[in-house]
Amino acid sequence: MPTSQSDPLYDLAVVGAGPAGLAAAVTGADLGLRGVLLDGGPATGGQYYRHPAPGLGAARPDRLHHRWSAYTALAGRLEAAAERAEFRGGHQVWALERTGEGFAVHVSRGPGAADRATLRARSVLLATGAYERQLPFPGWTLPGVVTAGGAQAMLKAGLVLPGRRIVVAGSGPLLLAAASSLVSAGAQVPAVVEAGDYLGYARRPGVLAAVPGKLVEGAGHGTALLRHRVRLRRRSAVVEVHGTERVTGVTVARLDADWRPRPGTERRIDCDALAVGHGLLPQIDLATELGADTLTGPDGAVALRVDDGLRTSVPGLWSAGETNGVGGADLALVEGELAAYAVAGAAPKPGLLRRRARLRAFAELMAGAHRPGAGWTGWLRPDTDVCRCEEVPAARIREAVEELGAGDPRTVKLLTRAGMGWCQGRMCGPAVARLSGGAGSGPDRRPLACPVPLSQLAAGAGPEPADGPVRASGG
């Protein structure tokens, strides 16, 4: 799609204003790069540093976050470097296109994504983060069931709770952080239900010893849960949600080593909300559409393959943070900074590569400890919706596999419509792949990374308005 040659040609376009993107933008500005930081949200921070809207009058947003000072420092540096690192809030990137000078970055803008623009950049850094992996079970579509990250987002952005008595369930370190936040905000959390076993971390004590900050963080969450008498149920899962118009309780069962429910271990817990998630999946659509190489991590999630300088296999395209495999905010900050040094052709600060290596090793250990077991499909009943957008139950997917011969997620999709809804398979993709026999069809490649109105596709891409980009406060 054409762009106006009068538009600026940026040295670096950073997609995503979370920890990795913020670190890359301010470091790039310090190194003399002219950059632009793009995010679909109105303010910087991303999902991790999500903060209340100014109209809510939150006096102490720092109480809702871990290491809030790191965010405020980055936001301050970004504001000071505004001439070299522009922040454009409300700019949702839906496609990248290779050009002779670098990349055309196609964005939707404004309320309801009402119009579009195309920016030009020599290099692009993807810092698009991750989204939650969901595994279906009976009742998971009831009002009152939210993702673990969604519960935190409601609290951070809206200062509201999804309920008063909330069970937190699934697998992964996000559960402890979510439960700690919820009880600190006044919610009752009768149990944290972890499908995995934290003993998996003990397999590599050297990796744990190299990241003492992670141990301190985990101990802090554990202390908060003990203080509020929250019970941790390991090797267990929510296998059914009860209620008609909303959640009234959940059934929890013990699991074997492969995550199969153990008969006779079921127990009901009364609650009015469930926050559930089974780890995170890298958001890599923009890169895979360009043919970027990927790898499968210890948790089965597909991430981008990068070198020590955070370069992908696509010339001019870098990646930092969760897109390279989920590892948390500390790792994202380091990788964002390292990527900016690589784009600028400068040597990184001493010790930065070693810190990244330690944090990445911990991320791999964490992913392996919480990898979903194949036996979770034992939670499903024939009428359990797997694809909630298209209301496709488990029975129809099994019929496609066992009777119609489907052997991969794409064929199942064509036969059942599973994955054709609004989320385009992001919610049901892992479940459909497992029910298809466990054989994936490789990373998704789609020309549009997010929904785009047909009116935008029919219209030509225009330059940014003369009065400049939409600005948003970073603080």
Image: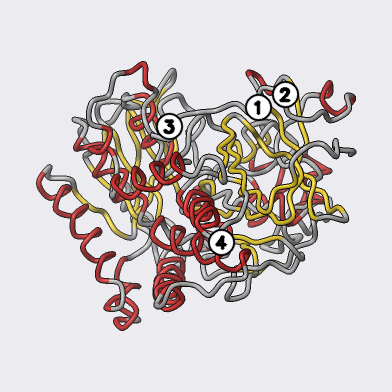
> Pointer 1 and pointer 3: residues touching (CB < 8 Å)?
no
Q: Earlier in the sequence, mark 1 or mark 4?
A: 4
Would you say residue 402 is visible in this rendering?
no
Q: Mark 3: which amino acid?
A: Val
Left or right side of 182 for 338: right
Q: Secondary structure at mark 2?
A: loop
Residue linked to disc 2: 465
Q: Mark 4: which amino acid?
A: Ala
Residue linked to disc 3: 145
Question: Residue 38 placed where, x, y %?
Answer: 60, 40
Question: Residue 84 placed where, x, y %?
Answer: 57, 46
Q: Give the foreground label among 4 and 3.
A: 4
Residue linked to disc 1: 468
**The N terminus lies in quadrant:** top right
Left or right side of 142 for 188: left
Q: Secondary structure at mark 1?
A: loop
